[in-house]
Image: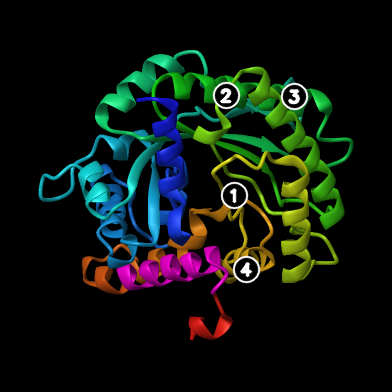
């Protein structure tokens, strides 16, 4: 597959308002979600829950890609069909999270680096054979007292670039996710400044490694106030500052930007995306790559019970459609009633 094809894959995932369902929760994370609804997390239950989402009517036309955990990539649906084929039959492309999580950058440090480069090439070959079309790697940047340091940003963005190069050499599109956490009491302007530093570093390293930007998708945070900040920025300010930060730091030939929700409420994540697309004035597609903001309503409706599956699928389908409308700048709060 040539790089032209990688560009076609990247464009397909975020075409016509479509976005990404992030269903790549690790076994530990999905257990916490299931604990919240008093449901045991077994391999079969995890499969049933994710199959329920993938089979929902709202997948078709609203979701262009699904990020999977390795377990799910290799699972079959209850009827024996591979989950990859279930996803493909809904018009979405299967992808996989390939990073191996975080470790402290040094002893006693609040800052982390992401692991997983050592055997990445070998794993990518296997995932591509199974049918993955794209991958994801997440770097985490924390705002706090005297952090993030330049060393932390540089090391994390270098690893993201190394990851992207290896993935493209294995004919898959890399999603690069440099997440500046919303946890903390920082202002929206501090978030803006740190995110600018992060994006500048990332795209310099991608350029240095000769990563094909046209075959890459960016999954960034929005520019928002820290969750504990006394003054919370409104929807329009978030939209304007996020678009400004991206215009200053992201190459215009990148096909798509698919935001993470990062702990925002379902409605906030949708409203912010819609407001950005109403501003317009950029070449890339501005879309979504949401986990909780697409799944939470469905999880609560499901409660681990088979008889609730239809209601849960309706809840998921509604959020998928709302976010598609937001990615087109056509969402309105009245549509939520």
Q: What numbered label is drawn on residue 268?
A: 4
The answer to which image quadrant residue 242 occupies is: bottom right
The mark closer to the camera, 3 or 2, is 2
Q: Residue furthest right?
A: 146
The percent coordinates of residue 319 (x first, y second) are 45, 68
Mark 4 crowd level (few <14, some 14–19, many ≥20, 10 Å Cα): some
Which is more N-terminal, label 1 or label 4? 4
The mark closer to the camera, 4 or 2, is 2
Disc 1 from disc 3: Cα separation: 25 Å
The percent coordinates of residue 243 (x first, y second) are 72, 55
- The local secondary structure at tag 3 comes to helix
The mark closer to the camera, 4 or 1, is 1
Mark 3 crowd level (few <14, some 14–19, many ≥20, 10 Å Cα): some
Q: Nearer the viewer, residue 186 or 260?
A: 260
Which is more N-terminal, label 2 or label 3? 3
Q: Which residues are magenta?
A: 312-330
Disc 3 from disc 2: Cα separation: 17 Å
Disc 2 from disc 1: Cα separation: 17 Å
- The local secondary structure at tag 4 comes to helix
Q: What numbered label is drawn on residue 284?
A: 1
The percent coordinates of residue 315 (x first, y second) are 38, 72
Which is more N-terminal, label 3 or label 1? 3
- The local secondary structure at tag 1 comes to loop
The residue to which callout 3 is attached is 154
Which is more N-terminal, label 3 or label 4? 3
Q: What numbered label is drawn on residue 181?
A: none
Disc 4 from disc 3: Cα separation: 31 Å
Q: Does the CB distance between marks 4 and 3 fall below 8 Å?
A: no
Whether residue 123 is situated above or below residue 238 in the rendered picture: above
Q: Tell me the chief SS of the magenta region.
A: helix
Disc 4 from disc 1: Cα separation: 22 Å
The residue to which callout 2 is attached is 211
């Amino acid at each position: 597959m040539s790089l032209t094809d990688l560009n076609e894959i990247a464009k397909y995932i975020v075409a016509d308002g479509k976005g990404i369902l992030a269903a790549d929760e690790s076994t530990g994370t999905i257990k916490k979600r299931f604990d919240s609804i008093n449901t045991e997390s077994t391999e079969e239950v995890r499969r049933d829950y994710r199959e329920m989402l993938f089979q929902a009517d709202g997948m078709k036309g609203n979701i262009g890609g699904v990020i999977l955990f390795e377990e799910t990539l290799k699972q079959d649906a209850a009827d024996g069909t591979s989950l990859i084929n279930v996803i493909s039959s809904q018009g979405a492309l299967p992808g996989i999270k390939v990073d191996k999580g975080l470790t402290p950058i040094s002893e006693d440090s609040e800052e982390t680096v992401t692991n997983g480069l050592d055997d990445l090439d070998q794993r990518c070959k296997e995932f591509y054979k199974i049918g993955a079309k794209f991958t994801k790697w997440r770097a985490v940047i924390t705002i706090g007292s005297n952090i993030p340091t330049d060393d932390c940003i540089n090391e994390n963005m270098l690893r993201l670039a190394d990851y992207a190069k290896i993935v493209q050499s294995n004919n898959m599109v890399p999603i690069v996710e440099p997440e500046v956490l919303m946890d903390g009491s920082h202002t929206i302007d501090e978030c803006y400044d740190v995110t600018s530093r992060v994006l500048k570093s990332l795209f310099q390293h991608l350029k240095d490694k000769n990563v094909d930007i046209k075959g890459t998708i960016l999954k960034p945070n929005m520019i928002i106030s820290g969750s504990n900040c006394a003054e919370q920025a409104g929807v329009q300010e978030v939209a304007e500052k996020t678009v400004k930060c991206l215009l200053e730091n992201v190459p215009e030939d990148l096909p798509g930007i698919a935001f993470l929700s990062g702990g925002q409420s379902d409605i906030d994540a949708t409203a912010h995306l819609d407001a950005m697309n109403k501003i317009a004035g950029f070449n890339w597609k501005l879309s979504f790559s949401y986990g909780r903001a697409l799944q939470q309503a469905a999880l609560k409706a499901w409660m681990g019970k088979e008889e609730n599956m239809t209601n849960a699928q309706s809840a998921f389908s509604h959020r998928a459609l709302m976010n598609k409308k937001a990615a087109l700048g056509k969402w309105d709060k009245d549509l939520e009633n």
